[in-house]
Amino acid sequence: MAAIAAFGAEGLGLRRLSRFYANPCFPKGMGPDFVNAVAVADTADLGGDAVAVLAALHRIEARFGRARSTRWAGRVLDLDLLALGGRIFPDPEKQAEWRALPLGIQQSVAPEELILPHPRLQDRAFVLVPMRDVAPGWHHPATGCDVTGMLAALPAAAVAEVIPM
């Protein structure tokens, strides 16, 4: 909760916060269970600028001891920018390219620029279950699917692993 409280100091006005959920580490077997939540924040103080919002999230992570060493390494805090309204960033082609990237490549290659919406959000129950709490009607601007539809497309077992705390 202290990290959420730090949003205001970074120009992010907290509007809604989901419940907290426990789920297995991703990728599975790489560490202890995670706790996930989704926040909706007002970004007007940052001009709605996606890069500025991501930089603010990274400053919060650093304040709480996050060190960025290797991709998908264990971490004390991981704040992802999932979406910024209905924007696609940097462009629809790049977003689609990263959305289609195989898991093995995702684990070793990081994009050189911010990709929005987050290219894997539609594949991750641990993102979509808490997102349903705060933005069930949000539509993915590239696919047209809403949160409820994206969740319905996932295996029931993956959704069942995301447990409210």
Image (tube, grey):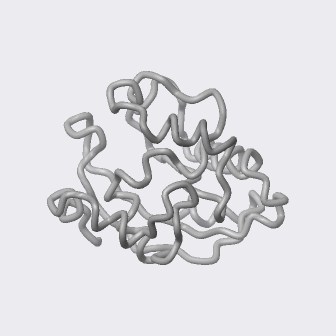
In the depicted structure, whether residue 40 falls above or below residue 123: below
Seen from the viewer's position, the closer of residues 109 and 3 is 109
In the depicted structure, whether residue 36 falls above or below residue 58: below
User: Would you say 108 lies left or right of 89 here?
Assistant: left
Residue 134 makes an appearance in the image: no
Rendered location of residue 122, percent (x, y): 40, 55
Rendered location of residue 8, percent (x, y): 72, 66
Q: Which image quadrant is residue 101 in?
A: top left
- In percent of the image, x 22 and y 40: which residue is there? 28
Rendered location of residue 97, percent (x, y): 51, 35
- In percent of the image, x 57 and y 29: which residue is there? 111
Seen from the viewer's position, the closer of residues 42 and 69 is 42
Number of numbered discs visible in the structure rendering: 0
User: Would you say 69 lies left or right of 30 here?
Assistant: right
- In percent of the image, x 60 and y 48: which residue is there? 116
Residue 77 makes an appearance in the image: yes
Question: Residue furthest toward the left?
Answer: 157
Rendered location of residue 59, percent (x, y): 68, 45
Identify the image quadrant of the C terminus: bottom left
In the depicted structure, whether residue 78 falls above or below residue 43: above
- In percent of the image, x 40 and y 74: which residue is there? 19
In the depicted structure, whether residue 119 falls above or below residue 2: above
